[in-house]
Image (spheres, rainbow, N blue to C red):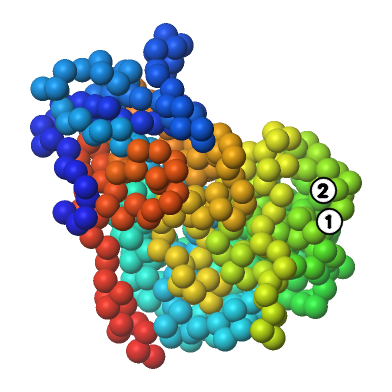
Amino acid sequence: MSHSFFQPPAQDNYVLRNLRAPRCLLQVDAATADRLRPIHDGHSDLVAVDLRIAHGRIDAIAPAGSFDAASGPDLDASMVLPGMVDVHTHLDKGHIWPRQPNATGDGAGASKATGIDRTANWHADDVRQRMDFGLRTAYAKGVVAIRTHLDSLAPQAAISFPVFREMRERWTGRIELQASSIAPLNIFLTDEGRQLADIVAESGGRLGCVTKSMTYPADTMPPDLDEALVRVFQLAAERGLDLDLHVDESTDPAARSLIRVARTAIAQNFKGRILCGHVTSLALQTDDFIEETIAACKEAGIDIVSLPTVNMYLQDRSPEARTPRWRGVTVLHEMKARGLRVAVAGDNCRDPFYAYGDHDMLDTFTQAVKILHLDHPLGDWIRAATETPAAIMGIDRGTIKVGGPADLLVLKARSYSEMLARAQFDRTVIRAGRAIDTTLPDYRELDALMAV
């Protein structure tokens, strides 16, 4: 086993004693909740617990000290989290940076570089090997569920969706996988859009697009935006599909399509789930327009995911040596305060949209706290990387509950302060009650793919 700071007992039944867990992620009855001792670290809602594991599932949650020393190891106040959930990634793009870097570091450069690499190299085996590399990395980090976007301009959808279906089956029981298409909005005004919707439906996916147009690439708000949005909603409704959209990922305040998405959903009486990602330009609007947009999203039932590491990397770059003036993230605090479901996610990894990353949702959350000021108090923001994205995905993950799978991260850190200050490279990842090997795949495995 690699780097894990402890190993749980080998038997099927044992207790992990003296742990600290976020109260907001524990599903316990009222009597148990009243008995849990809060940890007053000035920062969070941690409580002291013992967890009894039986045959790969959580059999009991009790106040720390409820079980005797013979029942299992004393973890000395180590934090425990449920397996984490990444609701917005791009596994098909991952790890192409060595063969196709982004010379400018901005969104336009990323799109150009990705298009070049996709056309030249994204055959099925290339996508398969890189996707598997990303999944093995995420698994070793303690991620239990992922939704990946798949570049879907023809002919790529016919290549990548079958690979995704294969990987979803291969990874059953380890990482729960979902997929969403991603393509320019205007293709849904053509037969290619209908064909793509059919591929998505056949694959059990989500219909997705970018609210940008190939026909009007210079326009932040293309003139065919509303017509194309209506068609996207219609195609999804006809096939019973949820929507997952890339929206207003821009530094331009003229990018205002989120409110149009919400109004279209309301006008179409859309019954499916809607997730909108990025919406960075909303942070550059007036307070009144922000309030109006959030209200429309609330009425439409839209969920929001912020991609803080990637958008801080891409947004407000300059071709000159100029320091960025803003963080490139959306108004997540305001959205959460008004009742929207909000999540954070990892997005890209070692590709032209983000030169860094390692499929690690614990690291994504840690950086989100710092980038978005999700602290003082930290409150229940940990839900944005666990319970909330799971709910958005429609899966039963992201909490610690009796009867649930014993899929856990045990950290040496005893508090959020320690967790956020020091990278948790020595975490123990438990799946079905057993510690897994957290050795990461070696980048050298991808060398043959990079030699093009």
Q: Secondary structure at mark 2?
A: helix
User: Residue drawn 44% across and 41% down?
Assistant: 416
**Mark 1 or mark 2: whose residue is earlier in sequence:** 1
The N terminus sits in image quarter: bottom left
Judge from the rendering whether residue 113 lies leftward or rightward of residue 107; answer left or right.
Answer: left
Total numbered badges shown on the rendered structure: 2
Q: Which residue is mark 1?
A: 285
Q: Is residue 63 visible?
A: yes
Nearer to us in this view, 298 or 400: 400
From this view, report whether residue 361 is shown above or below residue 68.
Answer: below
Q: Which residue is mark 2?
A: 290
Residue 133: give x, y in percent of width and height: 33, 66
Q: Label 1 crowding class (10 Å Cα cut-off): few <14, some 14-19, many 20+? A: some
Question: Marks 2 and 1: in contact by CB < 8 Å?
Answer: yes
Residue 203: give x, y in percent of width and height: 48, 54
The C terminus sits in image quarter: bottom left
Judge from the rendering whether residue 309 lies leftward or rightward of residue 173; answer left or right.
Answer: right
Residue 256: give x, y in percent of width and height: 82, 58
